[in-house]
Amino acid sequence: MKAYRIADAGRDPLASEGPLASALWDAGAAGVAEQGTDLVGYFEFAPTVALPGGGTWEDVEDVDHVAAYHLALGAVEVGPLVVAPTHREVVLKAGQTVVWLDPGMAFGTGHHETTRLALEALAGLDLAGRRVLDVGAGSGLLAIAADRLGAADAWGLDLDPETVAVARANARANRSRARFEAGGFGDVAVDPPVDVVVANLYAELHAAFLPGYAAVTTPGADLLLTGILDRRDDLVRDALAAQSTFDVVAWRRDGDWWLVHVRRGG
Ligand SMILES: C[S@@+](CC[C@H](N)C(=O)[O-])C[C@H]1O[C@@H](n2cnc3c(N)ncnc32)[C@H](O)[C@@H]1O
């Protein structure tokens, strides 16, 4: 197997979700991974198209990198939640609840700062009786966690139909009522409106989606918006300052990433 390494591919939006990664997938990559700030595409067969990003080729051991990555994943504890891949054994402490999560090729294991920020923020809300929408559900972790935390309804949508299959499999593994639909935010009807939106996307999208979030939420709704890279947070701060539907409850930071919690006025 050969690896095509693009040095310093950048992290906003997450390199493994950005246009360079898409080009690697389109060229037939068997896997794409972030390694520090590098983006690496793994190829079993030489691509027939030119690759972008000025990368360099390396020979790598012929191993299943996705399987190796999954095997190495450990459990993550966030508030009362323990997120663990199904091959791990988990011993819960009093008050903890487990979410079994096999990410496949979808984003969302609980290890990334943005997912952890979103889980923490969800765990900090009283979700009883509330309808939760997870925008950009990826592996389904946030919607499944919302269901586990007592939401009346939890559903997720994602542009990428392959991640929706992963999210549904994870919901089944957890006997969760969380449900998932393929589609982009704004294209899929949200009716009735929801009480909580959790969205791990990126700053530009949140800034653009504020009117859309207003259109699909009830008065008093909480929005938990993350995937906001430090130095891009101004985009969201400015967009929030320019509207009057949502009030900022808190900005929280983990490493290079921000989550903003806003509440819709009553
Ligand atoms: C960073 S991942 C978040 C996954 C998971 N929710 C988490 O927090 O770990 C972002 C996901 O959003 C999806 N996405 C990007 N733009 C979207 C849009 N406009 N509407 C719906 N999903 C979108 C991507 O396909 C990707 O699966």
Image (spheres, grey):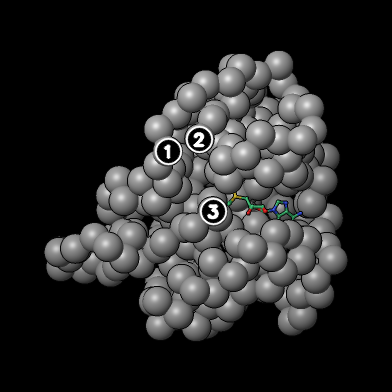
* Quadrant (top left/top right/bottom left/bottom right) for the C terminus: bottom right
Mark nearer the N terminus (1 vs 2): 2
Name the secondary structure under disc 3: loop
Kind of residue at badge 1: Asp
Marker disc for residue 140: none
Residue position for label 1: 62
Left/right of residue 2 with respect to residue 241 in the rendered view: left
For label 3, count other residues whose C-alpha is less than 10 Å away and answer few (under 14), some (14-19) or many (20+).
some
Kind of residue at badge 3: Met
Kindly tell me whether residue 54 is visible in this rendering. Answer: yes
The residues bearing labels 3 and 1 have C-alpha atoms spaced at a distance of 19 Å
For label 2, count other residues whose C-alpha is less than 10 Å away and answer few (under 14), some (14-19) or many (20+).
some
The residues bearing labels 3 and 2 have C-alpha atoms spaced at a distance of 19 Å
Do tag 1 and tag 2 residues touch (Cβ < 8 Å)? Answer: yes
The residues bearing labels 1 and 2 have C-alpha atoms spaced at a distance of 5 Å
For the point 82% across and 46% down, the residue is 208
Left/right of residue 111 with respect to residue 252 in the rendered view: left
Q: Position of residue 104 (x, y in %)?
A: 49, 58
For label 1, count other residues whose C-alpha is less than 10 Å away and answer few (under 14), some (14-19) or many (20+).
few
For the point 39% across and 76% down, the residue is 174
